[in-house]
Image: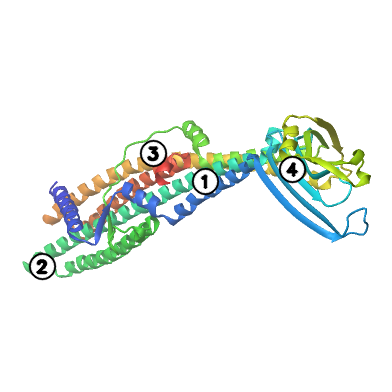
Amino acid sequence: MQMRKTTIILLLFAGISLFLNAQSEPNVIQLSLKECLAKALKNSLNIQVELIDPELAQVSVDQAKEKFIPTLSMNYNLRDENSASYSFLDAEDTLKTNFSRFSTEISQQLPTGGSLSLSLDGSMYDTNRNFQTINPRYSSNLSFDFSQPLLKGFGLNISRKDIIVAQNQLAMSEEELERALQEQIYEVEQAYWNLVKAIENLEVQKQSLRLAQDLLEKNKRSVEVGAMAPIEIVQAQATVAQRQADILAAESEVKNSEDRLKTIINISADMEAPKGATIIPTDRPEYTRVDISLDEALATAMQNRPDLAASRIGLENSEIDLSYTKNQLLPGLDLTASYWSPGVSGDQILYLNDNPLTGRVVGTVPGGIGDSFSDVFAFRYQNWSVGLTLDIPISNILSRAQHQQAKLNLEKAKIQLKNQEQQVFRDIKIAVRNVATNYERIQAYKAARELAEKQLEAEEEKFKVGLSTNYLVLQSQEALADARTAEMGAAIDYKLSLAQLYRDLGISLEEKNISIMDIK
């Protein structure tokens, strides 16, 4: 009983000293697991890279949607021609022609695969040629054009294929981002609890050294009073030396574990953290029993695993590719329809006796481009046309090859998804079993540690009255140190098995109350 009280006092003293040193030492930072997770998700270069992928995928979606944004085009052309006249019937000396034209068109791709366009154009023709009846001449035209494939290229999913695939790629990148975050969370937890385990093991080794040193001092006093032979000190001294070596190994493991945690959370990117600061974890592996059935775990994993969700989306893309390539095997049958309204105006030249061949102009009737447009928008001259175009390729080897490739890719995607689901089933079984096993290990090692404490107390009491030996006391001390290390290791393993279970279930973010939007 006295031994247990001494142990508790020593542990409390060590904990208080560690806390005071952490408060007074400016190069020491205390971090909880939650704080480490926040730093890792903020500073991790891997996460920063993963965050870019959804943005790139969103850009691809926007680019694909541009297909259905109306296109406006405008054109203006001005031409001035001068050439020698080779006939007095054409012109007296130099033949001059001025020509200008402008056009405006707005076109729109239709979700059914067709296209619709509206265009307006006008032109002006002015020349010094003889015998002209209208000069300058203004002409204009308003036209509506419609085209719709009826077989090859027809359908909402066919025309929107690139958009749907891009949207699926965006969804896949978001699922992959979530998976990367879950892996990051697990890596942080693993590094954090391994550091806790290394620190606790170091404390156990230090306490074991103190016990060996206490026994060595007792043996020295016994030798001084003649109650023990000097040879009995040698074994205690050897044990002290061995445990000092164990402490060196434990200190090295603490540093290694700390470096791993620093790398994962990228502590160098934290401007608030002192350079070269030592991390002191503040959380302890407290544990409560978590019971989850295998069926419940499998259902949760099938619903929440981001890698499975990404594979299902990839399978959907393969189905879209197959549908598209099948459509491309059809012959082309296109419906076209047009409606247009022209208009003509200009300065009408009046000749003697209404005969241009006289060459004698007796007057003009002015007319401008506005008159031409008046005819256009009044639909004075209405015209329309409807047509069907059938295109039957003699050979479509490339399209058939692409269709066959799409069929094979779909079959491959189905097999890969099935294989992935089997691997998930295996991982979940192992994870659920590890959680249950590690909890039982904690209980077993706790009982072993309590028995080792009682055994050491008993050996020390017997040693005081000469009923035990140095060897048995030191052996009991080592057994207690091993039991404490094993209990702490089992507690850490339980925390890590829970972290692995949550990762395999795909619920790490929910369990840690982390939102992707907060990270973005």
Residue at 86% across / 51% down in the picture? 129
Gap between marks 2 and 1 measured at Cα: 70 Å
Give amino acid for label 2. Val
Would you say the residues marked 4 and 2 are in contact, meaning their CB atoms lie under 8 Å apart? no
Q: Which type of secondary structure does the marked residue at label 2 adopt? A: helix
Q: Which type of secondary structure does the marked residue at label 3 adopt? A: helix
Gap between marks 3 and 4 measured at Cα: 68 Å
Quarter of the view holding residue 345: top right
Would you say the residues marked 1 and 3 are in contact, meaning their CB atoms lie under 8 Å apart? no
Q: Which residue is mark 4?
A: 122
Name which of mark 4 and mark 2 comes first in the sequence: 4
Give amino acid for label 3. Glu
Would you say the residues marked 1 and 4 are in contact, meaning their CB atoms lie under 8 Å apart? no
Q: Does 76 sit left or right of 423 as displayed?
A: right
Q: Which type of secondary structure does the marked residue at label 4 adopt? A: strand
User: Closer to the camera, 12 or 2?
Assistant: 12
**Relative image position of residue 116 (x, y in whole percent):** 72, 36
Q: Please name which of the two marks, 1 or 4, marks the residue nearer to the observer.
A: 4
Is residue 314 among the parts visible in the rendering? no
Q: Which type of secondary structure does the marked residue at label 1 adopt? A: helix
Q: Please name which of the two marks, 2 or 3, marks the residue nearer to the observer.
A: 3
User: Closer to the camera, 375 or 22?
Assistant: 375
Name which of mark 1 and mark 4 comes first in the sequence: 4
Q: Which residue is mark 3?
A: 511
Label at residue 176:
1
Name which of mark 2 and mark 1 comes first in the sequence: 1
Q: Which residue is mark 2?
A: 223
Residue at 75% across / 50% down in the picture? 100
Would you say the residues marked 2 and 3 are in contact, meaning their CB atoms lie under 8 Å apart? no
**Relative image position of residue 364 (x, y in whole percent):** 80, 41
Give amino acid for label 1. Glu
Q: Please name which of the two marks, 2 or 1, marks the residue nearer to the observer.
A: 1
